[in-house]
Image: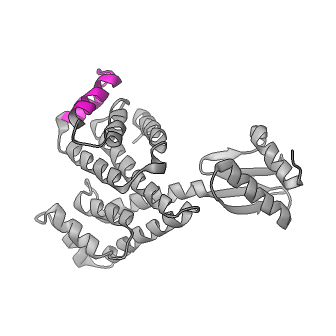
Amino acid sequence: MAGVSSESLATALADLETKLPTASLSLADELFGILRVLDGSAGLRRALTDPSREGAEKSALVQRLLAGKASTDAAEIVSQLASQRWAGSRDISDALETLAATVAIAVAEQRGGVSGLSGLERLENDLFSFVRTVDDSHDLQAALSEPQATAEAKRALALRLVPAASDEARLLIGQAAADPRGLKPTELVKRFAALAAKRQERWIAEVVVARPLTDQQAERLQAGLNRLYGRELKISTTLDPQLLGGVRVTVGDEVLDASTLARLTELRRQLAGQTG
């Protein structure tokens, strides 16, 4: 996915972020269900990606189709998705799959409590456990790709392989087995794992400093970053004597350096032990 579709997906993910703190696994399951409807109707996909239609018109179409059949959150997510511009009719389905998986991943993140990283790490481990099990067995690979087997039979087989996996992992694995959308189930599970790994970056602060931190400075840095981002971050610190500005912090896609002095000033004051 590239160009206008990539931009639309980025917008949809940003909009979704506001719903994730209270999202449930049932919302992810709903979105996967709507994805199956989209995949089964080329005409609907064309209607929702028709560049000659206004976004509001396409959004209204989704609201009418889902009225009484989906939750308010699910209908809102899909209608917002439809209001965006898409380069191809398949792109909107691919985007919806990403949104559904992101909801499930965020639920795993919530399960981690104060440190959402632990929930995400467990999810990623569960997903790769399934991948390793299938990759080690030609019989399982054949069974999961058997064209005569029903989607539900494949889902049931996949879930028998991961009895101890989290509910979020089981939803994603079951989805990949039942509806891999042109991929091998393990390849789709790897995509889901990559999304989980990407979300882990929100919990990791890569800190580069010009000189080593004392224990007290490190504690203040930890407290300052936790307060700044509103969550308990895992900090990885490296040394670069040539660093201008003294400190650079990267959390996910966000970089704080000399170009963001307003936010770094507070961190520098924390490291210096200043208050007020």
| Residue 118, quarter of picture | bottom right
Q: Residue at x 28, y 57 (%)?
A: 183
Residue range (magenta): 44-64
- Side of 143 where 167 appears, left or right: right
Front-lying residue, 180 or 168: 168
Please tell me how many numbered marks the rendered image carries.
0
Q: Residue at x 39, y 62 (%)?
A: 190
| Relative vertical location of residue 51 with respect to residue 62 in this rendering, above or below | above
| Relative vertical location of residue 58 with respect to residue 132 in this rendering, above or below | above
Q: Residue at x 65, y 49 (%)?
A: 229
- Side of 186 where 111 appears, left or right: right
| Relative vertical location of residue 197 with respect to residue 165 in this rendering, above or below | above
| Residue 211, quarter of picture | bottom right
Which secondary structure is most common in the magenta stretch?
helix
| Residue 232: percent from left, percent from top | 64, 59
Residue 42 highlighted magenta (yes or no): no
